[in-house]
Image (spheres, rainbow, N blue to C red):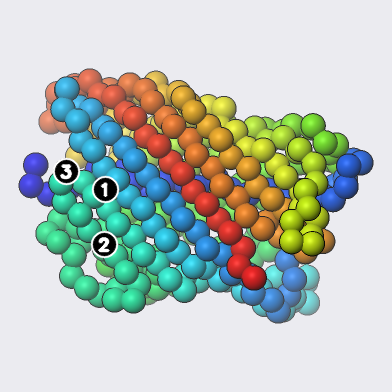
């Protein structure tokens, strides 16, 4: 193999665990995410992916890592109480290694030409860095709309265009809001959520997540609420109409290891930090050129997200 195919590249776009907000105190409380008009929150995000895809006995190893600084700016409330929050990347650095070749993206020099075969990934990185994403929240906190300027996406490979689809982004933002329990919780209470992670190319990872509220902790003079996060299940599916030249027709994946936690500042209504790691293993059935091939997957995803002072 002389260059990465679009299928291998698409498998590297992964989900970091979404955060929750929890309430203060040892008694039953209601969770409360807060969005303050006219403010900006900045986060530092780190993500790593280690993957070994085995096809007909041949191992294809890929690794990726990224470092990002993001700003979330809330506008002023409209007359109907809706509020727009815009996400922008201030810094984006990424490294991708596949079948012995490496590509590095640095937002300080976004137009640097990538090695042969990596142009689709370079275009995704450029678009991600350069494209603001605005989420419109209704007065009750539900997601009303997601807006992405289409002119920023003209160079995206059609296989990955759905990564910037506004309906899919709205679904993702809504999933985050819906992860909050709809009733007050006590220390030790648990709740579950199913989340779809769109990978591009008609591929989706579906995670089952379990959360447990473990109580308050003191940190730097603030009371933070700790929530333990565990991945309980994972499933993969590919749209039969996917443009990928390699089709995955069936899969059996399991969660082998999982750990995670997040800390929430109830006074400010913000996630202060979160981190997670999940190890996934399983078998795949693949179809290439009309030939069915056996496959195996070993995938480790890790992420860390920290609110900046």
Residue 231 in the image, given as x and y percentages of width and height: 56, 32
State the image quarter where residue 123 is shown: bottom left
State whether residue 10 is above or below residue 256.
Answer: below
Which residue is pictured at 34% across the width and 60% down the height? 94
Residue 241 in the image, given as x and y percentages of width and height: 30, 39
Q: Nearer the viewer, residue 203 or 208?
A: 208
Residue 249 in view (yes/no): no
Q: Secondary structure at mark 1?
A: helix
Q: Quadrant of the C terminus?
A: bottom right
Which residue is pictured at 23% across the width and 38% down the height? 61
Residue that carries the numbered disc 1 in the rendered image = 9
Residue that carries the numbered disc 3 in the rendered image = 99
> Gap between marks 2 and 1, in whole Å?
14 Å
State the image quarter where residue 229 is shown: top right
Q: Quadrant of the N terminus?
A: top left
Q: Earlier in the sequence, mark 2 or mark 1?
A: 1
Q: Earlier in the sequence, mark 1 or mark 3?
A: 1
Q: Secondary structure at mark 2?
A: strand
Which label sits in the foreground, 1 or 3?
A: 3
Q: Nearer the viewer, residue 55 or 155?
A: 55
Residue 104: which numbered mark, if any?
Answer: 2
Q: Earlier in the sequence, mark 3 or mark 2?
A: 3
Density class for disc 3 (Cα within 10 Å; few <14, some 14-19, many ≥20) is some
């Amino acid at each position: 193999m002389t260059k990465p195919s679009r299928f291998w590249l698409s498998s590297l776009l992964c989900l970091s665990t979404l955060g929750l907000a929890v309430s203060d105190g040892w008694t039953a409380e209601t969770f409360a995410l807060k969005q303050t008009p006219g403010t900006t929150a900045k986060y530092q995000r780190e993500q790593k992916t280690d993957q070994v895809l085995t096809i007909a006995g041949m191992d294809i190893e890929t690794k990726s890592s990224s470092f990002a600084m993001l700003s979330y700016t809330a506008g002023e409330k409209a007359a109907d109480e809706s509020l727009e929050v815009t996400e922008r990347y201030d810094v984006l650095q990424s490294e991708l290694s596949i079948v012995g070749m490496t590509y590095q993206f640095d937002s300080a020099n976004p137009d640097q030409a990538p090695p042969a075969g990596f142009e689709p990934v370079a275009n995704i990185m450029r678009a991600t860095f350069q494209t603001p994403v605005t989420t419109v929240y209704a007065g009750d906190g539900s997601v009303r709309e997601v807006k992405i300027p289409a002119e920023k996406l003209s160079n995206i490979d059609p296989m990955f265009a759905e990564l910037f689809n506004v309906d899919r982004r709205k679904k993702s933002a809504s999933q985050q809001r819906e992860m909050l329990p709809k009733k007050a919780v006590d220390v030790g209470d648990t709740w579950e959520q199913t989340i779809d992670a769109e990978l591009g190319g008609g591929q989706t990872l579906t995670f089952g997540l379990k959360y447990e509220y473990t109580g308050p902790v003191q940190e730097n003079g603030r009371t933070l609420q700790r929530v333990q996060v565990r991945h309980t299940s994972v499933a993969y599916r590919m749209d039969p109409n996917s443009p990928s030249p390699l089709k995955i027709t069936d899969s059996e994946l399991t969660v082998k290891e999982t750990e995670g936690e997040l800390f929430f500042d109830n006074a400010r209504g913000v996630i202060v930090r979160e981190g997670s790691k999940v190890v996934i293993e399983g078998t795949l059935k693949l179809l290439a050129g009309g030939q069915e091939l056996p496959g195996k997957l070993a995938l480790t995803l890790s992420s860390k997200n920290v609110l900046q002072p």
